[in-house]
Every structure is written in structure tokens, then in C-alpha cells.
């Protein structure tokens, strides 16, 4: 009961304090809002980069060419064996007739050449198109398939795929680092602003100590105050960025420059965005404030 | 052991100034003690040792059974809860009302609102300021502000009330009113009072125990003492 009363009093005190130090509170909230907008934008960017690289990586396919003289049963065995591999996400059979059709669609030159062959004389081979779960292991998976009986050739864009994966890894890491760096900067800025607020409240802290308040009791309202400031400060960035992104997405028709670069659908992004920005604001606000009072507590 | 006991206390500040030297004092329950001396004689240092704003360099300071010299920073609040402290500059919070300033000293105990209200009003009644409970400090006279700070100091019914020049900012008439409040607290509530002051008139009028400090040395300890005996 005592603890609950103290908790509620701290919460109500924290709200009163925000009101009574209104101009400083507004300054803190503005500072928090501005940095959180940066955080939000970087989150949007990193989610888009991630989804783009993932979609490209998903498209990478291992093409398995089966021996021309393989029987139906032998082909089935190959398919079953590929299916059993851990890293295989999906497997699709593509007959030489289908491959022919696809090639004809792709270019006029191919179209003319391929038209000369009938289904019987078609020089192409039946293939399996294999998609993998982890692109980093694609080389090993390809090698393993190569060892199967009746498998003639295995191709997956060797060299190119590894390069792509490497570059994407770096890009992803950079976006993570940017987000983390911004969160740290935000933490720093917020705790600094709150420090200024608290310097003005040195007297209050001094008197609290004089009348016998324990350090944790003194820190509690400041903790909540930082929490509210962080909470209020994240509202504007959340709305601005959610609606801003929605607008951009619709305006650009869901893609950037070309159809290959698809933007993340807003409904898939908004939840993460709201939660991340809110958490960063609230946690950084509360602990920034908590840390800032410690300086005046002679611990 | 007496309520307050100082044994062989030395206080030397970091800058080399020795503010108190070989002090031995004991003060019993319910006593009223003036600490007098010229400016710089160590009165405030003596007071600060009692509420553990400063630690003695040597010796021990016991207040209500707590060895103040050995009290860690994180535990200082336990001592402060047994004390009421009054300063020359009142130390009120300008953005809080009279009522809130007094209730402020009760809030960390987790009392119910009605308990807080009762105690706060009782303390304000004690100093005769119940009617001003909604005022802000800057709407009060100096004497009234000091009475609010006294109400805050006694609201938790401390065993000891320590005051550092409580009348230092007040005119003689108001000083006397404030002193009467403090004496009343001593008589009615049995609170031990320790007051640093250099106000001759007050010391001479109230005729209490007087500790005289001179350059950090206790040169006199008189029952029903007066200031006249001294050079300053
Ligand atoms: N925080 C401090 N640091 C260094 N010296 C101090 C400090 N406080 C007081 N002093 C010195 O200690 C001596 C006693 O001061 P103080 O206790 O304030 O005397 P009083 O209250 O009687 O005027 C003075 O010489 C003063 O300059
Ligand atoms: Mg002094």
C-alpha cells in the first residue's frame, strides 16, 4: 500500500512538474521529437533496404540440369533427393518445352532461333529450379546437388551471387549502424536536455534530501517525467513519419524508380515504426532523466 | 547516551581551514541550546555536522543513536527523517503553495492523503499560518515564510529541530515572533532545539543554554547564558 501510494504520488508529481516547468518541458519535447524523426526516417530506410535485398536474394535460383537420357524414375529420385536437403526452400520442375516458351518470350532473336525446333528436336534440357533458404550456403547446396546421379550441370550465378550477398550484407550492416548511432545520439541529446531541466531543479532536489527523501524516492518522479517527455516527444514523429510514408508510397505507386525496387507496404512497416520510436522515446527519456538526477545525489 | 553527543570532533575543510577543533558536547532530550560566536567561528559547520551535510575529519557525532560520521551517503535520509532543519533563507519551493511546501516533507512516507492533510494542517496551525495554506511563498512576508519552513521542519514530529540563523533575514519584531514559535515547539512538543545565531537580543531574552564558539573552539558552555559575557 505504501509503495503503491509512493508510486502514484511520483507519477502525479511528474505530471505536475512538467506543467510547472512548461517552457523547459516544451524545449525537451521538441528536442526529443526532432531526434526521433531522424530515428524514424532511418528505420524506414533500413526496413526498405532490408526488404529490397531480401527480395533480390530470394530470387536467386539454382538451376539443375538433368541428364538427357535419364528415365522418368531417375528424375523422380533426383527431385526427391533435392527435396531432402536442409537448405532447400522450394523446388520447381521446368520441362524443356516450358524453357523454350520462356526464352521465346524474352527476346525476338531467341524466338526466331527456337521456332526452328519442334518439341522432339528441342536441344534444351529439363531443369529443376531450386530456391534456397540461406543464400550464404547456396554454393555448398549447389555442390551437393552436383554429386547426385543423373545431374548434368548445376548453375546458380557463381561469383556474382557471392558478391551480391557480400555487398548486401555490408549495406544491411550500415543501415543497422545508422539506426543504432541515431538512437545513441538521441539518448545523449535527451539526457542533456533533461540535465538542463534538472539543473533548474537543484534546489528542489536539495530540499528533498534535507527533509529526508531517499535517493530512489527522489529519482522516481524524474524517471516518470523523462518517460512522459519521451512519450509526448514521440507522438509527432510517429504521426509525421507514418502519414509521410503512406503519402510517399501512394505517390510513388509503391516502387522507387523501377518496378524492381518495391517499397515496403505501409501496413507492414507502421507497426514496427510506431513501436520502435515509442520505445526509444520512452526508454531513453526515462533513463536519461534518471541518470541526470544522479549527478545531484552525491552517490 | 544523550540524544546528541560529539566526541573529540575536528573539522578541517579541504582548503585547509580548521572550522572546529576538539569539540566535546552533549545535548539531552528536550533541551534548548543556542550556538553563538562571531562570523566564521564555526557555527554553521557545527550545525552541518548534525545533519550530515559535512562529516567530521576526526571524532564521532552521534544523533539519536546514529553515528553520523560513519553514515553512508545513500543512508543519510534515515538521519534526516529524525531531524527538522530550518535555514536563514527558508529554502521553500517557489512554485509550490504553502500547503504543498509543508506536505512535501511527508510525501516519501507513503501516507494516505488524509493523514498527510491532517499532519500538514496541524503543523500550519502550530505556526499560525493555517489561513495562508493556498498562498505561494512570494506572497508571504519573510517572517511568514520562515514560519512555513518551521512548519515543514516539524510536520514529521522530529526529535530535534536544528536551526542555522533562522532570524538572520528578519527584522527584530518578526524575529521575536519566530523565536516565540520555536520556543513554543520546544515547550509544547518537547522537541530538542539547537540554534546557531548571532542575534544578541534573542539570546539574552530567552536565557537558554549557550555554547560559545571562537575560531572553532568551544570556549564556553553556560546554562541560562547571555551574550553579554562575550566580547562580540
Ligand atoms: N565548505 C567550506 N569549505 C571551506 N571552508 C569553509 C567551508 N564552510 C565554511 N568554511 C570555513 O570554516 C570556517 C567556519 O565557517 P562557518 O561554520 O560557516 O562559520 P559561521 O557559521 O560561524 O559563520 C570559516 O573560516 C569558513 O571560511
Ligand atoms: Mg553561518
Image (cartoon, rainbow, N blue to C red):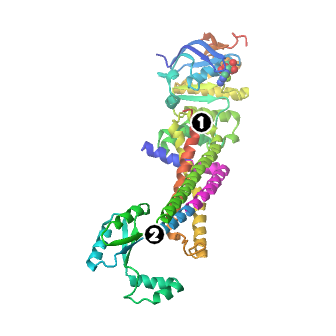
Residue A17 included in the magenta stretch of the image:
yes
Q: Say left or right for A145 vs B168.
A: left
Relative height, residue A3 to residue A133 (above, below): above
- Image spot of residue B71 (x, y percent): 50, 25
Q: For residue A139, which quarter of the picture?
A: bottom left
Q: Quadrant of the C terminus of chain A?
A: top right
In the depicted view, which residue is nearer to us: A255 or B52?
A: A255
- Image spot of residue B46 (x, y percent): 60, 20
Q: For residue A204, which quarter of the picture?
A: top right
Q: Quadrant of the N terminus of chain A?
A: top left
Query: Which chain is home to disc 2?
Result: A
Q: Which mark is residue A60?
A: 2
- Image spot of residue B82 (x, y percent): 51, 28
Residue B198 in sight here: no
Q: Main secondary structure of the magenta part?
A: helix
Q: For residue A133, which quarter of the picture?
A: bottom left
- The residues tagged by marks 1 and 2 sit, at their Cα atoms, a distance apart of 59 Å
- Residue segment shown in magenta: A14-43
Residue A197 in sight here: yes
Q: Callout 2: few (<14), some (14-19), or many (20+) C-alpha neighbours within 10 Å?
A: some
The residue where tag 1 is placed is A296
Query: Which chain is home to disc 1?
Result: A
- Image spot of residue B37 (x, y percent): 68, 16
Relative height, residue A99 to residue A266 (above, below): below
Amino acid at each position: 500500500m505504501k509503495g503503491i501510494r509512493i508510486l502514484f504520488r511520483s507519477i502525479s508529481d511528474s505530471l505536475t512538474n512538467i506543467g510547472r516547468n512548461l517552457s523547459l518541458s516544451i524545449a525537451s519535447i521538441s528536442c526529443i521529437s526532432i531526434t526521433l524523426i531522424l530515428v524514424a526516417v532511418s528505420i524506414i530506410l533500413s526496413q526498405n533496404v532490408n526488404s529490397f535485398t531480401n527480395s533480390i536474394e530470394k530470387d536467386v535460383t539454382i538451376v539443375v540440369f538433368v541428364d538427357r537420357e535419364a528415365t522418368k524414375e531417375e528424375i523422380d529420385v533426383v527431385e526427391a533427393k533435392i527435396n531432402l536437403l536442409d537448405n532447400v526452400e522450394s523446388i520447381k520442375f521446368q520441362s524443356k518445352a516450358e524453357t523454350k516458351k520462356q526464352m521465346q518470350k524474352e527476346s525476338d532473336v531467341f524466338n526466331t532461333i527456337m521456332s526452328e525446333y519442334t518439341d522432339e528436336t528441342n536441344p534444351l534440357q529439363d531443369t529443376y529450379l531450386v530456391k534456397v533458404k540461406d543464400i550464404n550456403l547456396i554454393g555448398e547446396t549447389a555442390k551437393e546437388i552436383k554429386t547426385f546421379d543423373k545431374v548434368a550441370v548445376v548453375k546458380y550465378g557463381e561469383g556474382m551471387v557471392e558478391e551480391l550477398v557480400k555487398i548486401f550484407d555490408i549495406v544491411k550492416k550500415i543501415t543497422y549502424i545508422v539506426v543504432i548511432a541515431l538512437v545513441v545520439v538521441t539518448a545523449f541529446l535527451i539526457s542533456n536536455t533533461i540535465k538542463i531541466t534538472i539543473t533548474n531543479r537543484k534546489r528542489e532536489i536539495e530540499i528533498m534530501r534535507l527533509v529526508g527523501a531517499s535517493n530512489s524516492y527522489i529519482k522516481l518522479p524524474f524517471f516518470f517525467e523523462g518517460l512522459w517527455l519521451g512519450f509526448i516527444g514521440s507522438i509527432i514523429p510517429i504521426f509525421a513519419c507514418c502519414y509521410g510514408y503512406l503519402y510517399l508510397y501512394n505517390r510513388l505507386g509503391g516502387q522507387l524508380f523501377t518496378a524492381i525496387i518495391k517499397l515496403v507496404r505501409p501496413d507492414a512497416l507502421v507497426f514496427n515504426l510506431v513501436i520502435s520510436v515509442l520505445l526509444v522515446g520512452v526508454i531513453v527519456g526515462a533513463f536519461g532523466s534518471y541518470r541526470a538526477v544522479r549527478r545531484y545525489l552525491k552517490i | 547516551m544523550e540524544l546528541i553527543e560529539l566526541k573529540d570532533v575536528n573539522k578541517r575543510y579541504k582548503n585547509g581551514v580548521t572550522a572546529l577543533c576538539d569539540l566535546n558536547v552533549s545535548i539531552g532530550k528536550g533541551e534548548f541550546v543556542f550556538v553563538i560566536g562571531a562570523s566564521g567561528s564555526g557555527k554553521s559547520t557545527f550545525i552541518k555536522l548534525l545533519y550530515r551535510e559535512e562529516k567530521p575529519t576526526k571524532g564521532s557525532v552521534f544523533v539519536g543513536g546514529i553515528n553520523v560520521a560513519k553514515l553512508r551517503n545513500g543512508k543519510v535520509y534515515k538521519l534526516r527523517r529524525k531531524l527538522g532543519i530550518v535555514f536563514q533563507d527558508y529554502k521553500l519551493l517557489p512554485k509550490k503553495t504553502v500547503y504543498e511546501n509543508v506536505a512535501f516533507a511527508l510525501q516519501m512516507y507513503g501516507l494516505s492523503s488524509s493523514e498527510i492533510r491532517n499532519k500538514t494542517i496541524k503543523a500550519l496551525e502550530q505556526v499560525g499560518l493555517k489561513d495562508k495554506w493556498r498562498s505561494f511563498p512570494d506572497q508571504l512576508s519573510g517572517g511568514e515564510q520562515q514560519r512555513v519552513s518551521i512548519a515543514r521542519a516539524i510536520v514529521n514530529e522530529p526529535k530535534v529541530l536544528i536551526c542555522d540563523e533562522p532570524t538572520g533575514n528578519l527584522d527584530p519584531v518578526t524575529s521575536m515572533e519566530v523565536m516565540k514559535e520555536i520556543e513554543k515547539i520546544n515547550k509544547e512538543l518537547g522537541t530538542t532545539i539547537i540554534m546557531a545565531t548571532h542575534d544578541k537580543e534573542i539570546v539574552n531574552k530567552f536565557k537558554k543554554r549557550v555554547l560559545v564558539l571562537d575560531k572553532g573552539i568551544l570556549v564556553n558552555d553556560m546554562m541560562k547564558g547571555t551574550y553579554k559575557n562575550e566580547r562580540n
